[in-house]
Amino acid sequence: HLLGLGHRRIAHIAGPADRDTGRQRRRGYEDALAEAGIAPDPRLVAAGDYSFDAGRALLAQLWPARPTAVFVGGDVMALGALRAARDLGLRVPADLSLVAFGDPDAVRYATPGVTTVDLPVVAAGRLATEMVLRRVGDGGGEAEAEEVRHLEPTLLVRETTAPPSPDRTPAGA
């Protein structure tokens, strides 16, 4: 979404590197940049613990590298990043676009409304329950093949994303 809007200096506030979710979201960020032909800039990536305080501190840490957008690996961290943007005098999305990842209910009432990648957690819970009940109903046979299902997240575009302002895009970016 951010690449489609024209952003090329996209920061990433990642979750902890020792957690699968943090590693997977960072890999997705890096893969998207690579597909767009953009070399990752280590000055645009920082990791935290999914907390509000981490999001706030990490956006302030990343801001000197002048991203035009930030992809935040967790909703609560995104709220912290929004606060940091306000503290820095930035207008979201005019000066900085922001996309969060996770539970859209956590950021639904933020101002401005946060664009978020919605994980289908309710559907995942329902599917897991159905799989367990089916296995129990079948006697849980050992010969049963492991079932893997992938649920696709959806992007909920709200008010925190826009094309980069021409005066905010660094020359050559």
Image: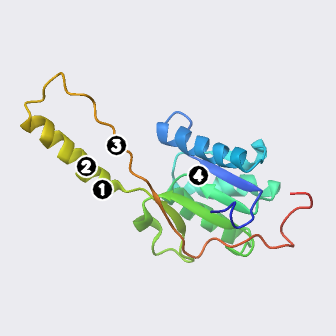
Residue type, mark 1 in image: Ala
Tag 2 secondary structure: helix
For the residues labelled 2 and 4, the Cα–Cα distance comes to 33 Å
Q: Give the image quarter of residue 120.
A: bottom left
Q: Label for residue 123?
A: 1
Secondary structure at numbered mark 4: helix
- Provide residue 138's location: percent of width, then percent of height: 9, 34
Of badges 2 and 4, the one in the foreground is 2
Marks 2, 3: nearer the viewer: 3
Query: How was this image coloured?
Result: rainbow
| Disc 4 to disc 3, C-alpha distance | 32 Å
**Position above or below: 16 against 96:** above
Where does label 4 land, which residue?
A: 54
The residue wearing badge 2 is 127
For the residues labelled 2 and 3, the Cα–Cα distance comes to: 9 Å
From the top left corner, tell me how far across and down residue 147 is, in percent.
28, 35
Q: At 13% across and 41% down in the image, what residue appears?
A: 134
Q: Few, some or many C-alpha atoms within 10 Å of disc 2 (few <14, some 14-19, many ≥20)? A: some
Q: Mark 3 points at which residue?
A: 149
Badge 1 crowding class, 10 Å Cα cut-off, few under 14, some 14 to 19, many 20 or more, is few
The residues tagged by marks 1 and 3 sit, at their Cα atoms, a distance apart of 11 Å
- Amino acid type at mark 2: Leu
Label 3 residue SS: loop
Q: Which mark is residue 36?
A: none
Q: Earlier in the sequence, mark 1 or mark 4?
A: 4
Q: x and y percent of residue 66 in the render?
A: 80, 59
